[in-house]
Image (cartoon, helix red, strand yellow):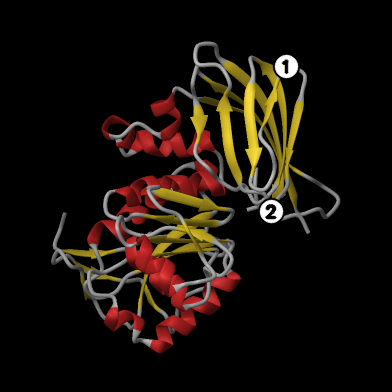
């Protein structure tokens, strides 16, 4: 099977209702794990991003819920009381799981029942994410083996020593490894939630939600920051019982533009339309491509360099991605 490729009142009840008339319609569930002393923005950021996304027709098949270790309100590090829709005992099957962090992770990591639940969910969900030292929850649940991941700034060495089979990434705010998104946490959790949303849908929809919550007025999205323009041309589910989905986009880099290291966890085909591109996947030599030339990236490849070879002229290329349906 093809692999998946090419993110105030003192008391909140964070369970978004199903639209009227849709009670019997199965919905995909995004679960945000909350617990006592969790850092507020680590969990409210994804709840806000996905809570906005589910109001749009493009994402109406999803709902987002808060899940706690047990059925009682929790109090965040900053004093916000949150009542979860579910506990880990009655939570529905999840399609995505997002976990946050605390300054003191000892109590939550000592909860063996919770770690077992996270381990089981992490193996079943299509998408998995953590913010800040929430990566330790995933690490203790053996969900970071063989994966690229990050944590809070300055915590990378500790994480590297603790999880020897994880490729810990330093000095990156958000790390994407296929269906796994990890981040520095705090306000970066908004960036991570939007990146997860982009992974689940596409860049154009993530930008739409960023605009809805005014994120793009505060922090430009990576595409705007670099001047990169991404245009979605086609999204098509394959028929005849196939689980595949084809996406076609054009990407335009300004002079000197580039993308950070990433992995799509999919089959990606690139065709250069204008200018020239420097492309490299981990373990292979870098290549410079001219108009009419192509580049292939497998689901297992880590794309370590994708950049405009010119510092002045634009580069434009066509990207066809073959992945599993979300």
The residue singled out by tag 1 in the image is 291
219 over 106 or under it: above or below: above
Tell me if I can see residue 169 in this picture.
Answer: yes
Name which residue lies at 79% across and 45% down. 238
C-alpha span from label 1 to label 2:
26 Å
> Residue 279 is drawn in which quadrant?
top right
Extreme-front residue of the structure: 285
Q: Which residue is mark 2?
A: 300
Residue 258: image tag: none
Mark 2 residue element: loop
313 with respect to 70 (left or right): right
The residue shown at (55%, 63%) is 95
Answer left or right for 23 relative to 294.
Answer: left
19, above or below 287, in the image: below
Image spot of residue 241 (x, y percent): 83, 55
Mark 2 residue crowding within 10 angstroms, few (<14) / some (14–19) / many (20+): some
Do the CB atoms of the residues marked 1 and 2 lie less than 8 Å apart? Answer: no
Give me the residue at 70% from left, 43% from top: 284
The quarter in which the N terminus is drawn is bottom right
């Amino acid at each position: 099977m093809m692999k998946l490729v090419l993110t105030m009142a003192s008391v909140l009840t964070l369970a978004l209702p199903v639209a009227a008339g849709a009670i019997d319609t199965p919905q995909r569930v995004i679960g945000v794990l909350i617990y006592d002393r969790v850092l507020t923005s680590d969990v409210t950021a994804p709840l806000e991003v996905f809570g906005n996304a589910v109001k749009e027709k493009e994402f109406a098949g999803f709902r987002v819920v808060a899940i706690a270790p047990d059925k009682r309100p929790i109090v965040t590090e900053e004093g916000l009381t949150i009542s979860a829709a579910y506990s880990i005992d009655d939570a529905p099957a999840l399609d995505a799981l997002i976990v946050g962090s605390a300054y003191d992770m000892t109590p939550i990591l000592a909860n063996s029942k919770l770690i077992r639940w996270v381990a089981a969910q992490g193996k079943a969900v299509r998408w998995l994410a953590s913010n800040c030292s929430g990566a330790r929850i995933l690490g203790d649940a053996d969900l970071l083996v063989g994966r690229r991941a990050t944590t809070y700034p300055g915590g990378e060495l500790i994480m590297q020593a603790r999880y020897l089979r994880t490729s810990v990434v330093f000095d990156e705010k958000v790390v994407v490894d296929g269906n796994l998104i990890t981040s520095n946490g705090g306000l970066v959790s908004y960036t991570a939630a939007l990146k997860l949303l982009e992974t689940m849908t596409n860049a154009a929809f993530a930008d739409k939600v960023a605009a809805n919550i005014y994120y793009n007025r505060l922090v430009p999205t990576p595409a705007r920051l670099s001047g990169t323009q991404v245009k979605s041309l086609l999204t098509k589910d394959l028929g005849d019982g196939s689980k595949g989905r084809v996406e076609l986009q054009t990407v335009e880099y300004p002079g000197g533009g580039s993308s950070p290291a990433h992995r799509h966890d999919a089959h990606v085909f690139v065709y250069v339309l204008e200018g020239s591109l420097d492309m490299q996947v981990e373990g292979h030599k870098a290549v410079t491509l001219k108009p009419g030339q192509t580049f292939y990236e497998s689901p297992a490849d880590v794309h370590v360099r994708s950049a405009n070879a010119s510092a002045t002229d634009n580069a434009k290329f066509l990207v066809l991605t073959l992945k599993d349906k979300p």
